[in-house]
Image (cartoon, rainbow, N blue to C red):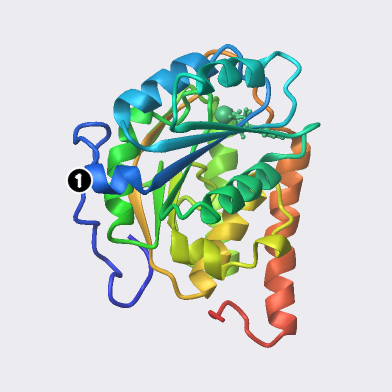
Amino acid sequence: MTDRPSSAGQEPAAPGGEGRAPCDRATCARALLVIPTYNEAENIDAMLDAVAGSVPGASVLVVDDGSPDGTAEMVEARTSRSSTLHLLQGNGKQGLGRAYITGFRWGLSRGFDYFVEMDADFSHDPAAIPQLLAAATHYDVAIGCRYIPGGGVEGWSKGRHLLSRAGNVYARAALGFGVRDSTSGFRCYRRPVLEAISLDQVRSSGYAFQIDMTYRAWRLGFSIGEIPITFRERSLGESKMSRAIVAEALWGVGTWKLRDLARGRPGSRL
Ligand SMILES: Nc1nc2c(ncn2[C@@H]2O[C@H](COP(=O)(O)OP(=O)(O)OP(=O)(O)O)[C@@H](O)[C@H]2O)c(=O)[nH]1
Ligand SMILES: [Mg+2]
């Protein structure tokens, strides 16, 4: 666990294991799951089924960027059968960060209190959503973490694993927070966090987006808790991971650090 004087060193009261406890009904009803999609036709139906089974009563917002493979049409076909499933459609690939911010704004204006981020490719286990939500009742930001006991990664090459580990060590050292998996895209924000962050200033897109949001939340003094998750490499569809995404994260972390040094607040909170 990271990082608020009152919570430092504590595990969340919620159990850390994946997918065992049902979702608390009241929390589920106040939760919005934001799922960005680009060419996820092979995954989306099964993903929406799995999410509905794991957190019945929670609302789901798919933010699709005009996937040429018909992902949005598949979601749209389901919206007539479900009052808790929603779809936002963009015109072209704008990146993960834009999609999430669009989704957060949509949910904030509709009064949701818990905002879960997750991928559509089953890398994030839908069965673990209740644990994430439970942790978010204790922490302002709950992060599904691969790099604490009980967490892990399946299906990655050594190189990919190393890149992720090194990226997290770099971000932690450079930015000064204690978060072990700030690149993780399986997380939950409580409403006040998203209200406090100036979302229109967040420009980063890939892994940088996750680190950027973590850093902003931490600097604003919000508590951040991590629970162990197992990340599984997708088995269907194509990864959108690219060198540009890695470069953006490397550049972003260095830039934010320099910006804070220039402002005379090296590594401190706002
Ligand atoms: N709306 C939208 N969704 C995107 C975009 N890029 C990726 N996604 C979605 O974001 C989620 C994560 O993307 P992935 O392709 O799995 O990328 P990744 O998780 O960074 O990379 P891998 O670990 O290799 O899978 C998936 O649900 C994608 O469909 C985008 O530009 N717009
Ligand atoms: Mg993925």
Q: Is residue 12 left or right of residue 251?
A: left
Q: Which residue is drawn at 65% across and 47% down?
A: 102
* Ligand 2 is within 8 Å of the C-beta of the residue at disc 1: no
- Percent position of residue 263, x then y: 71, 85
Seen in the picture, residue 51 relative to 113 is either above or below; the reply is: above
Q: In which quarter of the image is the C terminus?
A: bottom right
- Percent position of residue 128, x then y: 32, 35
- Pick the front one: 257 or 157: 257
Quarter where residue 37 is shown: top right
Q: Quadrant of the N terminus?
A: bottom left
Seen in the picture, residue 128 relative to 144 is either above or below; the reply is: above
Q: In which quarter of the image is ligand 2?
A: top right
**Residue that badge 1 annotates:** 15
- Pick the front one: 127 or 68: 68
- Percent position of residue 158, x then y: 54, 29
Seen in the picture, residue 154 relative to 43 is either above or below; the reply is: below
| Numbered disc total | 1
Quarter where residue 90 is shown: top right
Q: In this view, does 183 lie to the left or right of 223?
A: right
Q: Residue at x 31, y 24 (%)?
A: 53
Q: Can residue 239 be seen in this view?
A: yes
Query: Label 1 neighbourhood size at 10 Å, few (<14), some (14-19), many (20+)?
Result: some
Q: Residue at x 53, y 49 (%)?
A: 107
Residue found at the far bottom of this picture:
264
Q: Can residue 149 be seen in this view?
A: no
Q: Is mark 1 on a helix, strand or loop?
A: loop
Seen in the picture, residue 51 relative to 137 is either above or below; the reply is: above
Q: For the residue marked with disc 1, what is the amino acid? A: Pro
- Pick the front one: 252 or 121: 121
- Percent position of residue 251, x then y: 75, 56
